[in-house]
Image (spheres, rainbow, N blue to C red):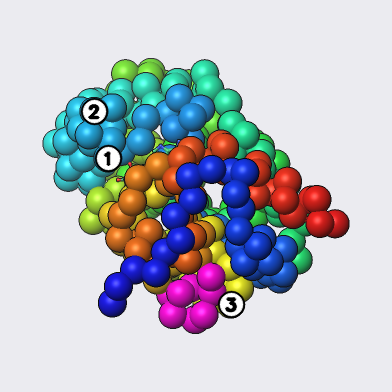
Amino acid sequence: MPANTVTLTDTAELPEALIQAFVSAHQIAVLTGAGVSAESGIPTFRDARTGMWARHDPMTLASPQGFEQDPATVWQWYQWRRQLIAETRPNAGHYALARLQQRVPVLTLITQNVDGFHQLAGSDRVLELHGNVHRNVCSVTGKVIEADWMEQHSEVQPPPSPHHPRGRARPGVVWFGEALDSDLLDNAFTAASNCDLMLVVGTAGAVQPAASIPVLAKEHGARLIDINPDSNELTRLADWHLVGPSAKWLPTLVDELTATD
Ligand code: OAD
């Protein structure tokens, strides 16, 4: 099927049809990826030069097997990421999505990011498909480990888990080969099926099941806006491709909605 996507490179030229789709939407779903946090200074995963997976093997650092083989290396990498996140802040894209949630009757924000920046910027009810890096869980039971337990232990090795004799603390994120939380995923699929408009922002669409969420929205008749400096499989599905950084496009779109109030 040939792509029918309208490509826009300049915020000054928002087409009327896009503005209408945006301001008339009652239910909006948003899927965000690493690109949204890129302008806060957090590297993406698949950028060929600066991406995490260009420099590190994902199976070593983000899989249960990698953790079993070398827990200290995995732990230290996550400690480094936590530090990076702690030193940076949400950007204009995150804040724009938080403003959007105040304006739209139903907005479901689905993210693959684990940095917590959407919440920090003021969004709530965020569906964190891949977990949250600030949380620690027991490697055997999956139970959350409280912060005061973590504070009593060293930073170099993953601390023992208080919930299981063979368990260790591990970051509360989803690793390769692990299942997503089924309630979260159901909620994301429901939002995609019911929305009039879906924004796909800063994701390469390379990881399932997240990448199937915009496909589902499209199948159920939603209009799709893809915000990304590059193109990928999801761009081909989009009605509009807004080429460029999310910190530029998201505030522009939300300002447009405010202007029509
Ligand atoms: P990727 O690194 O795969 O893709 C990032 C996307 O952001 C690319 O399409 C870039 O073109 C785009 N991008 C870069 N800078 C941008 C900017 N300033 N504004 C908007 N877009 C920009 O990241 P994800 O698609 O989020 O999973 O990756 C999905 C999952 O793969 C991650 O959650 C992670 C990873 O492995 C796990 O760790 C389980």
Q: Where, quadrant-wise, is the C terminus in this rendering?
A: bottom right
On screen, residue 33 versus residue 199, left or right, reads left
The foreground one among 139 and 215 is 215
Q: Where, quadrant-wise, is the N terminus in this rendering?
A: bottom left
Q: Tell me, yes or no, if residue 172 can be seen here.
A: no
Label 1 C-beta lies within 8 Å of the nearest ligand 1 atom: yes
Decide: few, some or many residues near mark 2? Use Cα within 10 Å; few <14, some 14-19, many ≥20. Answer: few
217 drawn magenta: yes
In the figure, residue 81 lies in which quadrant? top left
Give the CA distance from mark 2 to mark 1.
8 Å
Place of residue 131 in the rendered image (x, y in percent of width and height, measured from the top left): 45, 48
Residue at (46, 74) in percent of width and height: 218
Disc 2 and disc 1 in contact, CB within 8 angstroms: no
Q: Tell me, yes or no, if residue 217 can be seen here.
A: yes
The residue at which mark 3 appears reads as: 194
Of circles 2 and 3, the one toward us is: 2
Decide: few, some or many residues near mark 3? Use Cα within 10 Å; few <14, some 14-19, many ≥20. Answer: some
Decide: few, some or many residues near mark 1? Use Cα within 10 Å; few <14, some 14-19, many ≥20. Answer: some
Give the CA distance from mark 2 to mark 3.
38 Å
Residue at (38, 18) in percent of width and height: 154
Indicate the amino acid at tag 1: Arg
Q: Residue furthest right?
A: 261
The residue at which mark 2 appears reads as: 49
Specify start and end residues of the magenta stretch as a single range.
216-223
Give the CA distance from mark 1 to mark 3.
30 Å
Residue at (35, 36) in percent of width and height: 44
The residue at which mark 1 appears reads as: 46
